[in-house]
Image (cartoon, helix red, strand yellow):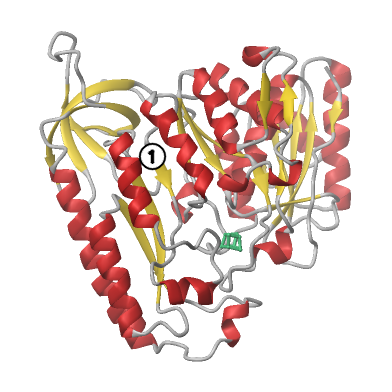
Amino acid sequence: MNEKTEIDADVNTEIKTGKVGFVSLGCPKALVDSERILTKLRSDGYEISPDYAGADVVVVNTCGFIDSAKEESLDAIKEAMVENGRVIVTGCLGVEEKAIREVAPNVLAISGPHQYETVVAQVHDAAPIAHNPHRDLTPPEGIKLTPRHFAYIKISEGCNHACKFCIIPSFRGPLKSRPVRAVLREAEKLVEAGTQELLIISQDTSAYGLDLKHAPETIKKGSWKGREVRAHMTDLSDALGDLGVWVRLHYVYPYPHVDAVIPLMAEGKILPYLDIPFQHASPKVLKAMKRPANEHKVLERIKRWREIVPELVIRSTFIVGFPGETEEDFTYLLDWLAEARLDRVGAFKYEAVAGAAANDLPDQVPEDIKQERYARFMEVSQRISAEKLTERIGLEMAVIIDHVTEEGAVGRTYADAPEIDGKVYLESASYLSPGEMVMALITASDAYDLHGEVLLEGDSDDDWDW
Ligand code: SF4
């Protein structure tokens, strides 16, 4: 019960990106909270410091089950105060604020057990870091309270590529995949705790397991007991699909083997949703960027994927104004986008990132041209989004509720990832709760969002469209 858990940490102390020290005490439930806090912090761009000295702030997840556990927790808080001085306390002992303040009056914040969203927000307050779209895996809005019904699972760290605009490999190192059993165990625990949507993240999800030579592991316990699962995106997706919750793949590069996950979508094992950061379409610009999986036949593959799974939704991000991008390259990108008709698209104007190789490239694009291209790009992507959403009017779709207001409920369909994509507004549905899954009739749409009404039992023809 009082076992002190060592949190695995790899960190480059030279990069000032926000480092958090972590002491995890107590039972497996507290450990799950620690893992969730750490997962969210890592996906928000924080590094985990292996020692007190390198940390901007230290989180102590306490145990308060028996007196000796309380003592151990209070000792850990005192030690963190002496060694670092900026300490956030959470966990079971958090309900005894007075006892904590007696030994450490200046701790920054105190919360009770299972309050991981609060702790993450407190870390952001205590050690804020700037959002960097080329580095972070979640948008700045991601620091707001994350509902319990969805969870990010990071399947690997680092990256083997060398995209010229990106500095991630320089401080996160090469691809380091988590063992498949660890990913599956985490997913299983999350689902047991009520998570209904698993968001698979990494720097390069399609490369998962490459460093492990995609070796199979025989899973020793849990849902897949006795089953051999390879450390490979396809096998992992297949296994996660057994959990019966939404599984959404992010940061997928269109390597040929991505074709193999499309049938899993057709079977309903994982969501027909792919987040592919294309960044550009012009072969010349992609080559200058040194992008992976930069092949010419992507449009044909998207067409084939849609033939197999017509409801497939593709989200992507693009960079406009990369050094050397000509008007011809940019027009190529716009034409490509119009043909690809991607569902969800974000764009960034190219910005120099300290340490990135692209900073030294010739033919940097002037700011006013970047702005003009960005506006033209957004106009096309917005038109496509609006057209595609109009096609959803009249459909009956499953909607997961994210939050509830006085006016109604706000949720998402399979086509939208939390925080980064669109929403479904359900009027007069304030009686719903976050995490509930309902059927809704889509009644209207705008550029990015849908509007609908909840179908009560008997209203639906049971032949819903997704
Ligand atoms: S694939 Fe490119 S952009 Fe993505 S992390 Fe690796 S180097 Fe950076």
Q: Cβ(mark 1) to ligand 1 < 8 Å?
A: no
- Dividing the picture into quadrants, the one containing residue 117 is top right
| Quadrant for the C terminus in the image | top left
Asked whether residue 141 appears in the rendered view, the answer is yes
Nearer-the-camera pick, 118 or 399: 399
Q: How many marks?
A: 1
- Name the amino acid type tagged 1: Tyr
Q: Residues within 10 Å of mark 1 (few under 14, many from 20)?
A: many
In the image, residue 241 above or below residue 142: above
Q: Which residue is mark 1?
A: 273
Q: Position of residue 291 (x, y in %)?
A: 54, 66
- Choose between 259 and 457: the one closer to the eye: 259
Ligand 1 lies in quarter: bottom right
Which residue shows up at 20% across the image and 25% down it?
Answer: 440
| Residue 414 at x, y percent in the picture | 34, 33
Determine the residue located farthest toward the top in the rendered image: 458
Q: On screen, 39 above or below 263?
A: below
Q: Identify which residue is drawn at 71% across, 58% down.
A: 172
Measured from the top left, where is residue 236 in percent x and y? 59, 31
Of residues 240 and 125, the one nearer the viewer is 240
User: Would residue 22 appear left or right of 261 to someone viewing this image?
Assistant: right
Q: Is residue 49 left or right of residue 349?
A: right
Q: Residue at x 40, y 79 (%)?
A: 321
Element carrying mark 1: strand
Residue 30, percent from left and from top: 71, 25
Quadrant assignment for the N terminus: top right
Q: Is residue 93 among what the camera can see?
A: no
